[in-house]
Image (cartoon, rainbow, N blue to C red):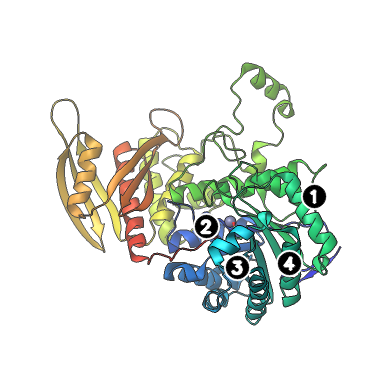
Amino acid sequence: MSIEHPSFGKLDDNRIIIFDTTLRDGEQSPGFSMNLNEKIRMAEALAELGVDVMEAGFPIASPGDFESVKAIAESLGQRDDTPVICGLARTGREDIFSAADAVRPAKRKRIHIFLSTSPLHMKYKLRMEPDEVLQLASDSVVLARNFADDVEWSAEDGTRTDPDFLCRCVEAAIKAGASTINIPDTVGYALPEDMTRIFTMIRERVPGADKVVLSTHNHNDLGLAVANTLAAITAGVRQIESTINGIGERAGNASLEEAVMAIRTRQDAVPFHNNIKTRNLLKVSKLLSTVTGFDVQPNKAIVGRNAFAHEAGIHQDGVLKHAATYEIMTPESVGWSKSSLVMGKHSGRAAFRDKLRSLGYTIGDNQLNVAFRRFKDIADRKKVVYDEDIVALVDDEVVRDHERVRFVSLDVHAGSKAPARAEMELEVDGEVRSAAAAGDGPVDATFRAIHAIFPHEANLVLFSVGAVTTGTDAQAKTTVRLEENGKMVDGQGADLDTIVSAARAYVHALNKLLVKRARTEPEALSA
Ligand code: KIV
Ligand code: ZN
């Protein structure tokens, strides 16, 4: 089997195309929405990671989605070495026009059309007869081909679709000009053997299936998304759709880092290759956590804090004697490094920039200046500055770029003798404003002061603090979740001072809320 693909040319038989949908399916999960700046930062990190296709959004869903897909197509999409930029669309003309418009600036672009094919979805969601769906599959692909050579067609709820009908739809989409055929397990219902059966059937029964890339897209409702992805590969699939940290609708999508490392670690069983630079995995995972405010659980495979930590003495002993006794891959291969003393208060700007490069960051001069000032501040106050400290403060600056409300300063008086009191300065739309407030403890006083400067209706629904490294002088990393009229946002902040980190997190969440308020709500869309 050798496929000539419009975006990738002649594909070798063992190449797996990595399709990332963190910015689309991932962003669809509640509380995970990102603003334009955050999406662009994530898109750059995904490109550096080496994904082949980046689904940048669902352009018809909202003006904000359209703008971010277009902005990514205009910036990243101009380089030859960057991923194919993809926009999602339903089968309607407006959807397809919108996706086509949004990806147009990209040198390599894809329109991804999805259409439900299962009896349940056709009857209750689409209210259409199978023959109408079949016709729509074909017509929509033909329309999309006017705007892009690279068109992907997805059979939504494909794994619960009648096998004969699925084959007819796939055949129609291929004849209409789709070069990638995706069979999503939309509701996370399938088992690995279903994957084997479905893709083997398509390859055996559908004319032209050997000339297109077959793709798998698995949701994790039964915790089987990665297992299903691997089963699909062994059944002939050559594109896998996944997200960083496995984020996505409901229980999420197949996690990119897990699927990629399973392929790399089990070459004996899955002898395929891809372009992912695995050493970047941890960095991208952390950036996503910073941007969305959701950390992965400590035991999360590959990128969780405990993924390479050995607690039991017998394991520690084994690893010291020979790492492979209890480690199936090296921590370094996915980006973990031992905490290292990096620099002190005498380190200069050039050394700081070099350090950032070695950690995989290339940031603009303005961000560098701000990050350097904060580094100096930390180096003055903290005995040892670790790589993790630098990563935390740079990520913290990155998420703050272009914010309407900015943290300027905070002075807090707390203790057991008098009510806590906070004096706060914030910059709002370029103008510095200040307020003082008392509260039940320093955090409450701080949040009240923010409220006094920038009145808002949002409720605080989550407040959590963790440490970036160990020791009493570790930086605090805070998450704040605000809720307003059913809209939920998470903000993050990091600082040596726990209360300052809380204030930064609150301000970050507030900025996200402002972006979310400005966004029009998408009509009920399914994907
Ligand atoms: O889960 C799903 O079916 C999807 C499609 C849009 C591919 O996300
Ligand atoms: Zn999905």
Gap in angstroms between the C-alphas marked 4 and 3: 20 Å
Instruction: Identify which amino acid the numbered label 3 is placed on.
Output: Cys
Q: Earlier in the sequence, mark 4 or mark 1?
A: 4
Viewer-nearest of labels 4 and 2? Answer: 4
Number of residues whose C-alpha sits closer than 10 Å to that of mark 4, classed few (under 14), some (14–19) or many (20 or more): many
Viewer-nearest of labels 4 and 3? Answer: 4
Instruction: Identify which amino acid the numbered label 2 is placed on.
Output: Met
Q: In the image, residue 247 lies at what x, y percent? A: 54, 49
Q: Which mark is residue 86?
A: 3
Gap in angstroms between the C-alphas marked 2 and 1: 30 Å
Q: In the image, residue 526 lies at what x, y percent? A: 52, 61
Gap in angstroms between the C-alphas marked 3 and 1: 25 Å
Vertical arrangement, residue 358 with respect to residue 91, above or below: above
Q: Which mark is residue 234?
A: 1
Number of residues whose C-alpha sits closer than 10 Å to that of mark 1, classed few (under 14), some (14–19) or many (20 or more): some
Q: Which residue is mark 4?
A: 170
Viewer-nearest of labels 4 and 1? Answer: 4
| Residue nearer the viewer, 84 or 126 | 126
Vertical arrangement, residue 253 with respect to residue 470, above or below: below
Q: Which mark is residue 330?
A: none
Q: Earlier in the sequence, mark 4 or mark 3?
A: 3
Instruction: Identify which amino acid the numbered label 4 is placed on.
Output: Val
Q: Earlier in the sequence, mark 3 or mark 1?
A: 3
Q: In the image, residue 162 lies at what x, y percent? A: 71, 58
Label 4: which secondary element: helix
Ligand 2 image-quadrant field: bottom right
Q: Which residue is mark 2?
A: 42
Q: Is residue 431 left or right of residue 520?
A: left
Question: Which residue: 29% across, 57% down?
Answer: 405
Q: In the image, residue 317 lies at what x, y percent? A: 67, 19
